[in-house]
Amino acid sequence: MSVVVCGEAMLLMLAEPGIPLERATAFRRSVAGAESNVAAGLARLGHEVRWIGRLGADPAGTSVLAMLRADGIDTRHAVMDPYAPTGLLLRDSHPSRAIDVQYYRAGSAASRLSPGELAPGMVSGARLVHVTGITPMLSDSAHQATLRLLELASEAGALISFDPNIRLKLGPPDLWRERVAPLMARADVVLAGADELELLQVDPAALDGLVVIKHRDKSATCGGLRQEAFEVPVTDPVGAGDAFAAGFLSGLLRGLPYEVCLREAAAVAALVVQCATDTDGLPDRAALDRALAAFAAAKTGTGETVHR
């Protein structure tokens, strides 16, 4: 495996576009979860990816597992729990007003992740292990499992990438600072929003690893370089951060300069926000190359943006 991710995957039920959640009568099924989104993004870009996590032994879990496998993700270490349900995410989708996101994850199979379920062979040979702050916030046992995962990654010689991915519905700021801030110091690559760094009270200059900062104006910086967001019509902003992470990590795994990593990350994010679900817009390698060419053509006013 090039990449191992570990975390929660949920069944996403997305309301019909433009309809408030409380009024929606039609829903579209998909998959959601920070780590699984990154896994799908990297898999479509040609990387071998393994997902480690827990699902309920229920129709929702079977559906999520099938969708992960459809992207070519290795799920051989997935645990199907007969005693706990798969997490559920309900949300609506609006291009220009606040989106209502409702999580049903308390007591889910994912929250029962424990350190004893993680073994060295799961990460052996991996070049990169990716996790987010959501996983340690799911439960005390999931927090301990995250610490175990980072130990195994270090022992295997894999790079560790970490995205705080703060969701305050999982806990108050103090708990995020207690559990998540220390994990950032153990990462080789940190992908964080400027607002997240402020909430966690983490000085990026104090981190030893590579730090990629996503700013409020949608630009991103890394190593003194800045990448502006590509201007595209936004259908749904949810999933943009995970898409950015997938694009950046793909470039990093291919040994590309940080400038190119940032540009590809911005392009993947721009493609995702034009689609409703977290994963529909994630491109394969050819689609990303076409998008980059189109963005370059739009900037210069030259070239053909329609690929016939």
Image (spheres, helix red, strand yellow):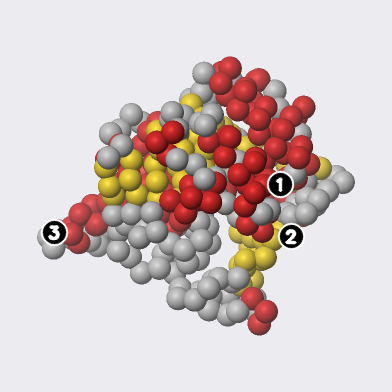
Circle on res. 22: none
User: Hey, what amino acid is under mark 1?
Assistant: Leu
Earlier in the chain: of badge 1 and badge 2, it is 2
User: Hey, what amino acid is under mark 2?
Assistant: Tyr
Front disc: 1 or 2 = 1
Q: Name the residue under label 3.
A: 300
Q: Which residue is drawn at 40% across and 46% down?
A: 213
User: At which x and y percent is residue 288?
Assistant: 34, 49
Distance in Å between CA atoms under marks 1 and 3: 46 Å
Circle 3 sits in a helix, a strand or a loop, which is it? helix
From the viewer's perspective, tell me whether residue 151 is left or right of residue 2. Answer: right
User: At which x and y percent is residue 124?
Assistant: 58, 20
Circle 2 sits in a helix, a strand or a loop, which is it? strand
Q: Please tell me in which quadrant of the rendered image residue 261 appears.
A: top left
User: At which x and y percent is residue 225?
Assistant: 27, 42
Looking at the image, residue 219 lies above or below residue 224: below
Q: Name the residue under label 2.
A: 104
Front disc: 3 or 2 = 2
Q: Residue at x 67, y 79 (%)?
A: 22
Label 1 Cα neighbours within 10 Å, binned few <14 / some 14-19 / many ≥20: many
Q: Mark 1 points at which residue?
A: 138
The answer to whether marks 1 and 3 mark residues whose Cβ atoms lie closer than 8 Å is: no
Earlier in the chain: of badge 1 and badge 3, it is 1
Circle 1 sits in a helix, a strand or a loop, which is it? helix
Residue 49 appears in the picture as rendered: no
Distance in Å between CA atoms under marks 1 and 2: 12 Å
Q: Which residue is drawn at 75% across and 44% down?
A: 139
Quadrant of the snapshot with the C terminus = bottom left
User: Hey, what amino acid is under mark 3?
Assistant: Thr
